Amino acid sequence: MTHILQIDGLTKRFHDWERFSPRAKTVLDGISFEVAPGEIFGFLGPNGAGKTTTIKILMGIIRPTSGTARIMGHDIVEQSQQVKQRIGFLPENPYFYDYLSVGEFLTFCAALFGITGRAAAATTDRLLELVGMRHAARLPLRKCSKGMLQRTGIAQSLVNDPDFLVWDEPVSGLDPIGRKEIKDLMLELKRQGKTVFFSSHILPDAETLCDRVGIIVGGRMHRVGTLPELLKDSVSWVEVVAEGLPAGFAPAGAKTELIAGQSIIRLDDAAGLDGALKAIMQAGGAIVSVNPQRENLESYFARQVRSAGNL
């Protein structure tokens, strides 16, 4: 299988019938991208960019206005039960039956996939341990914190041992320890050969987890690729470390600071690097290192969103 998810020209428009407006609002505007088997793909965008709408379409909750999407080679509109049984889904705002306990809820979810009896009990125990909720197995869901409910939602998405996980804001409501545990879980799922597609606006998490990311802004895909691909041309400045330079030496357009006998030279424009290196050598200096300082995903993302006029 070349792609586990393939989206082509997906568009969604909504009519505001409450205001009796005949004009449709375009929420998704012809987005296209693919997700390969076994990768962690981060679907990134600001609030209101269209992330949740895309996921609802993929899960069959709403239908697209136009365009196509295929999961495991099957069109989402015509998905069979066999395909759906291989998908694990965590919605942005999952609904829970308040008067069930955490363990009872997971057992109920297992039954939806035909897992009953001892197999259901074993599955529930395993998932409670996996998401750090064994201590809360008998706790009613109505008494759970936001973070505990989020862990329960992640557990239910794994009850059928899916090949493809679709998680909408999976670390929402989690404390730092919970976020780390879920990130570790995502990496473990990848090691097991599973594919994880998740939406988020917590960019440091995406930067440490993702094989590739897609950035959606205003309903349009703005960039898709690996982090090295996205950031390869985004050198913010260059640091050159040199020794043996005369006091007060500074190449044109650079700032120099002397630290522990070494000259730390900062170039705000990478285009001036060749000239600076020549000047250092001509002055009798020895070059210790050249360190391009690139943007991280967070600053790159902010720049892309601003360029699209959304900030």
Image: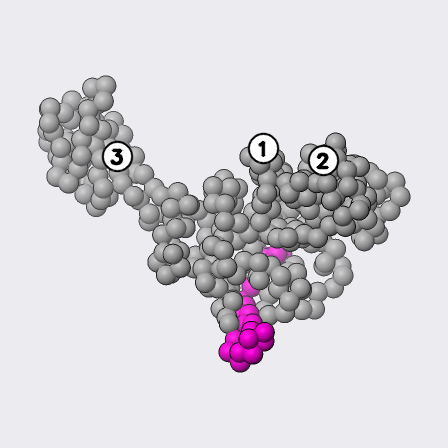
Q: Amino acid at mark 1?
A: Ile
Question: Disc 1 or 3, which lies upstream in sequence?
Answer: 1
> Which tag, 2 or 1, sits closer to the chain's start?
2
| Lateral position of residue 47 relative to residue 174, left or right | left
Q: Secondary structure at mark 1?
A: helix
Between 192 and 99, the one lying in front of the other is: 99
The amino acid type of the residue labelled 2 equals Met
- Figure check: 132 above or below 91: above
Question: The residue tagged with tag 2: helix, strand or loop?
Answer: loop
Q: CA distance from mark 1 to mark 3?
A: 35 Å
Residue 292 showing in the rendered view: yes
Specify few, some or many for label 3: CA neighbours under 10 Å numbering under 14, 14-19, or 20 or more. many
Q: In the picture, residue 241 is in which quadrant?
A: top left
Position of the C terminus, as image quadrant, is: bottom left
- The span from disc 2 to disc 3 (Cα, nearest Å) is 47 Å
Query: Which residue is under mark 1?
Result: 177
Identify residue for label 3. Answer: 239
Q: Which residue lies under the disc numbered 2?
A: 133
Q: Position of residue 29 (x, y in %)?
A: 49, 68
Q: Residue furthest right?
A: 117
Observer-nearest of 228 and 127: 127
259 left or right of 125 in image:
left
- In the picture, measured across the screen, residue 43 lies left or right of residue 250, that is right
Q: Which residues are magenta?
A: 1-24
Q: Is residue 211 magenta?
A: no
Three-letter amino acid code at the position of disc 3: Glu
Residue at x 52%, y 61% (from the top left corner): 50
Percent of width and height locating residue 151:
67, 41
Q: Quadrant of residue 54?
A: bottom right
